[in-house]
Image: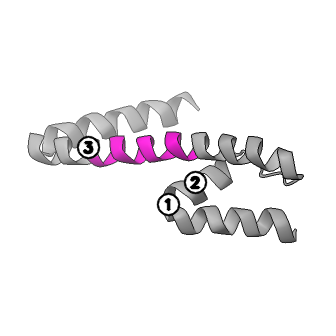
Amino acid sequence: MKVIGIVVVILVLLLLVVVDKKHIHRASEHLSVYWFRLAFAFLVLFAMNVAGGFVGIYVPVNITSGLLLAILGIPGIATLCAFAIFL
């Protein structure tokens, strides 16, 4: 397990040496936008769970539903609501 971790760290360092700063900046910007979307998705899932508790609908708060909501957006909310109602 240590060997895999060391190999991954070495590969990341080599990638940082080879790739120019413009590409690193662009990749980190895309990654930060994705993490923000994921955090906001969990906030929306929590709000859906609290609001759904008043009418008896449970929306699970887990990584799968968070990723679904972060990737799909508003259609993801509709999908999670449909899963909660029909399943």
How many angstroms separate mark 1 from mark 3 (CA)? 17 Å
Residue 55 higher or lower than 43, as above or below: below
Pinpoint residue 2: horizontal percent, then vertical percent.
54, 28
Mark 2 — residue? 67
Question: Which is nearer the N-term, disc 1 or disc 3?
Answer: 3
The 10 Å Cα crowd at callout 2, few under 14, some 14 to 19, many 20 or more, is some
Pinpoint residue 31: horizontal percent, then vertical percent.
35, 45
Which of the two residues, 15 or 40, is positioned nearer the viewer here?
40
The answer to whether residue 56 is left or right of residue 77 is: right
Secondary structure under the numbered disc 3 in the rendered image: helix
**Residue 79 picture quarter:** bottom right
Secondary structure under the numbered disc 2 in the rendered image: helix
Q: Amino acid at mark 2?
A: Leu
How many angstroms separate mark 1 from mark 2 (CA)? 6 Å
The answer to whether residue 49 is left or right of residue 5 is: right
Q: Are marks 2 and 3 in contact (CB under 8 Å)?
A: no
Mark 3 — residue? 29
Mark 1 — residue? 71
The answer to whether residue 86 is left or right of residue 73 is: right
